[in-house]
Image (cartoon, grey):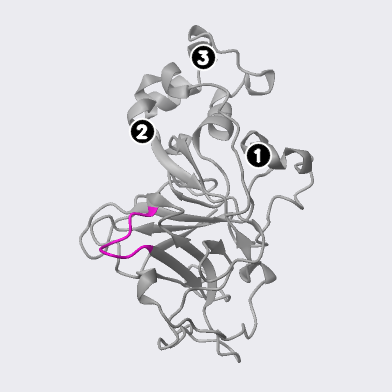
Amino acid sequence: MNVTRTTPPRPLDVAAVFPQLGPLARPAMRLHPRPGSPSPYDSSIGGPLLWPAHQPWLYCDMWHEGPVAPMLPVAQLYARDVPLLRPPGRADLLQVLWCPFEHPPEYKPPTKLFWRTAADVTDVLAAPPEPSGAEYDGYVPEPCVLAPEQITEYPDFLELSRELQQQLSDVSAWQAAGVVVDDSYAIAPQEFYGRELSVAPGWKVGGWPPWGLTDPVARFCVACGAAMSPLLTIPSYEWDDAGKGWVPYEDQARAAPGDDSASNPPGVQVSRGNHLQLYVCPTFPGTGHPHTDLIQ
């Protein structure tokens, strides 16, 4: 790892102000991808994969007009760098690939994942197939190295109980706890919670999923019925003007208002939504068939 990113502390400990949030806290790992030249032995976004030379490369098995579409590397995460992964068995490496073309009915890139044991890969594929095209340039990630950082998250406002939503929307509840809410949030203090205290933007493992125009929907494993857990958030931006409080210290000089040139280092632009969310079954994490959702 040759980059470091540090998220500023939150403006306040929201669980101390609203104790009902305490049990809902979850660890998340911000990945902080930044342009670089990763090797197959590095955790990366859009970098080369530790892919066995004897294993055929993956091609999209859905219909395409014209091109034969090889799956493209999206993320490679070693458990040594991202301990929140909790791989199954001896595995210590997660690889995520997608087709760079959208497919119905959801019109999102079909996604596949592999759990591997890195030590078992002794002969690495030297020349994976080049992409034959893409629906959008943003579906071909730029190679990035990572600077994983663990933080604590709380649920999106829309995932909270009605009682908690009412408390967070009541400015007097904040004032009673001695919290001075910025004038820009005085009418809607729940926006202060949503933008500054709950769900971090950007690439991350674990934590709570981001929501927007789409209402939260619980995800359940088709194999066992267990509730699925957020695995990987693939966003279009590391931050936006509404969430500048999450900008790492090291990037703040480049995070000018209205300038998003520094806020999307991998160049990934998820069309028809702001994020692609991968979930995994906690009971059967190694199925290789993640549930993905396009989050509007």
The image quadrant that residue 27 belongs to is: top left
- Residue at the (62%, 53%) spot, across then down: 2
Spatial CA distance of label 2 from label 3 is 19 Å
Residue 18: horizontal and vertical position, in percent?
Answer: 41, 20
Residue 281: horizontal and vertical position, in percent?
Answer: 29, 58
Residue 143: horizontal and vertical position, in percent?
Answer: 63, 66
How many marks can you see?
3
Check the image and report above or below for 109 versus 268: below
Mark 1 element type: loop
Q: Nearer the viewer, mark 2 or mark 3?
A: 2
Q: Amino acid at mark 1?
A: Val
Check the image and report above or below for 40 versus 160: below
Spatial CA distance of label 1 from label 3 is 25 Å
In the picture of the structure, the residue carrying the numbered disc 1 is 247
Q: Which mark is residue 174?
A: 3
Q: Residues within 10 Å of mark 2 (few under 14, many from 20)?
A: few
Q: Nearer the viewer, mark 2 or mark 1?
A: 1
* Mark 2 vs 3, N-terminal side: 2
Q: Which mark is residue 24?
A: 2
Check the image and report above or below for 202 versus 158: below
Mark 2 element type: helix
**Most frequent secondary structure within the magenta stretch:** loop
- Residue at the (47%, 74%) spot, across then down: 50
Q: Residue furthest bottom?
A: 66
The image quadrant that residue 236 belongs to is: bottom right
Query: What's drawn in magenta, residue-wise?
Result: 85-92
* Mark 2 vs 1, N-terminal side: 2
